[in-house]
Amino acid sequence: MVDIKPARNVKILNKNRRTLDRIGPNEPKSLGARFLRVRHRLFGVILCVSVFVSASVLLDSGLIPRWGQWYSLDLTLRQQSCSLLCGRLNLSESVAAAEHDQVWDNGRLQQVWGLGVPVWRIPFELSMRLLSALFRGLDEEAKYSVHPDRIAFGVAVAIVVFFVLLTFTVTQEGRDLYAWERHLYEYCEKITAVLLLALFPPFLTLLHQRFGVYQEVQAYSYLTGIILLAGTILFVRNPRFWLFVLVATGGGFAAFVRPTAGVFGIAALVVMLVRSLGIGWPWWRFAVGVSLFVVGWLMLYFTNWLRFGSGMEFGHSLNLNHIPTMRFAGRFGAPYSSEPFLSALRELASLLFMSEGYISETLRWRRVSFTSYNLTYAFPLIMVSIWFLIRCRRMLCVRKFKFGEKEVLAFWCIFCTASLFAFYLRFPFMNSRYLLDFAPGFAGGVLVFVYLLRDWGVSRFGKRFQFILFSGVLFWWGFHLIFVLEGTRASIRNTAITHENLIQRMELPHRSYRNFPEYYETGMPFQEYQNQFNGSGWDSSSGKTWASIALFVEDPEFLELTVAPEVQSVLSQKDYEIIQAKVALEFLEMESMTPTDDGMVLRFSGPKRTRYQDGIQVAFVAFMTVEELHEGTSRFRLLRVRWRHASLDTESRI
C-alpha cells in the first residue's frame, strides 16, 4: 500500500509518476513499490553522504591519524561502559585506582563525565565481545573485546549529519532522488544548514584540540543538541505522536551526556508543547511525552544520589586533583560567585566573542586555550533576537500565533543562549571547551539569520540572490576553518592509539600503596598511603598548607587537627575559627579549640550521615576565607591529623 493521501498530495503523486516513468523496465510495475524503491534510494544516498562527511571529519581532525589508530588514550569512559555491562555504576572499588578529576565516595570510584557517552558505547562493546567470541574463542574474548571508540564517535557524527540532511534538505516536494538533486541545486541555502549545524566551525575547532575525555564528552553534547534541534524541526513541520515521544524522551535523558545539555531538551519540549496545543491534541498525548521527559530527569537525580550522595551533585564538588584553589572554590565558596553583574556580563561576552577582551581582577580559575567564536557570530545573534522580539510583539497585537521554522530556530537560539549565559555568568571555573555549550544555540541563530537574509534578498534581487548568499556563507565558513584552525594545528597532540597499545595500557598494574596509619603528621610520606591525592595541598616536610587539602581517612569518628601558625607570625583564637572541614559533601561542626605551646588543636565532630561514617572517606579542610584565596599559601602549618581513637586493628580495607 502506498503511504500517500491522494486528496492532499495529487500534485506530488503526478510528479512522482513522471519521475518513475524514467526508470527502466526491470523496476517493479506497482506504483507504490516503485515509489518506495526511489525513496529508499534517496535515503541510501543521504546515508552515503553522511558516512563520507563523518569519515572526512575524523581524518581531517586527526582523531584517526593512521589506519588502526582508532582507540582513545583515555580509559575512563571505556571502564564506565564495562562497569555498566556488569551492573555497576562505579569504575572500581579500589581507592588506589583513582585518577585526576575522578571521585571517591561511599567506598567506590566514580567519574564525573556523565553516563550518556558510556551508554552510547555499550552496543559497540557488546558487538566486539560477540565478534571476539566467534572468531577468537571464549578464552581470549576478554582481552580482545575492546570497541574502537573513535569509530563509535564517527557513527554518532554520521547519524547527526543524516538527520540534518533529512530535516533541512528533504521537503514534501523533493522526496525522490531526482527531485532532491534539483532541490539542492535550486535552493542553496538548504545546504548551509549542513555547514552551520553538522559542520559548525566551533565544533570542528574542538575536534582539532587534544581529544581527551573532556573534549569527547563536550563533542557528544554538541551532537546531542543538534539532533534534538533536528527532531524539533521535523515535529514542527509534521506533528506526529511517535516523533513527540521520541524527542521528549531524548530531551529528558540529554543531561546524562552533560548537565548543560539538559537545556536543549527543555527547549525542544517547550517548542513541541506549543505546536501541539495549536493542533488540539488530546491531553493524554501531552501526558505521555511530558512523563517520559520527567522520567529522564528523575533517573538522573537517582543515579546522582547513588553515585555522589546527592541528586543535585554531579561530582564536581568531590573530584580529586592537585589544584588547591579549585578544590577550595568547589567546596567552600568562590570569590567570583559574588562578582558584580555588569563585570561578569562583560567578561563572559569577551570570552565568547573576543580573543583578547575584558578579564575581571576577581579570582577565577580560567583556562582559555583556543577561540571558538568571534564578532561575526555576535552580530547575527543580536539581529535575530531583535527580529524575534518584533515578531512576537506583532503576533501579540493581532492575537494570532503562528510559529514556523524561523521562529522555532530563533526561540531555540535565544532560550539556550540565555539559559547558559545565566549559568556561566558567575560560574567559578571557565575553560574554552565550556563555551562550546553555546554552540547549538549559536548555530541555530546563525541559520535563522541566513534565512532572514535570504528572504530580504530574494524579495529585492530575485532568486539569484540565493546563490550569492550561499557563496558568502561558504566563504565565511571556509575563512573560519582556514584561519582559526590553522592556529590550533600546532597544538594538536595525538591521543589515538592502536589495539596493541590499548591492551598494554589496560594491563598496567596499579601502583601499590601502604596501609592506613592511625594518624598523619609532618614528616610522614602520606602520599604513599592509599593514592596519589592523599595530602594534596599539604607540604609533608614543613607542614605548610595551601587553600585547602584532601586527606583520606578510614571510619572517621571525628577530625582532630593540630595546627600552628607560620614561622614568625602570631595568630589569635579568632584566626583559627576560619578553618573549615568536610567529609565528602557534609560540613563538620567544630566541637572544641584547645591551645597548645605551638598553636591550637581543633576538634571537629564526626559525620552524621551513615554514608560517611564507615570505610575510606575523603576529608577536605580549608585554611583560608574566600577573600584570602588569592594569597596562595595559608597562614597555618598543619602538624598532625587524627580521625579516630587508637585501635589495634590497622588493617586496610582496600
Image (tube, rainbow, N blue to C red):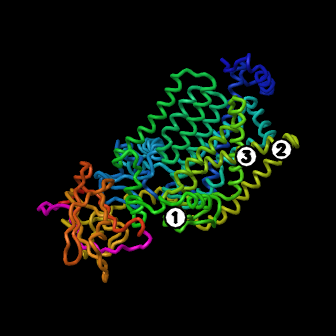
Q: Position of residue 616 (x, y in %)?
A: 25, 56
When the figure is inspected, residue 140 is found, relative to residue 351, above or below; the finding is above
Magenta residue check for 630: yes
Identity of the residue drawn at 77% across and 27% down: 23
Q: CA distance from mark 2 to mark 1?
A: 43 Å
Mark found first going from the N terminus, 1 or 3: 1
Tag 2–tag 1 contact (CB < 8 Å): no
Residue 647, located in which quarter of the rendered image? bottom left
Q: Which mark is residue 619?
A: none
- Amino acid carrying label 2: it is Gly
Residue 415, located in which quarter of the rendered image? top right
Mark found first going from the N terminus, 2 or 1: 1
Q: Secondary structure at mark 1?
A: strand
Q: Secondary structure at mark 3?
A: helix
Q: Residues within 10 Å of mark 2 (few under 14, many from 20)?
A: some
Quadrant of the drawing holding the C terminus: bottom left
Q: Secondary structure at mark 2?
A: helix
Q: What residue span does the magenta drawing correspond to?
A: 629-650
Q: Which mark is residue 366?
A: 1
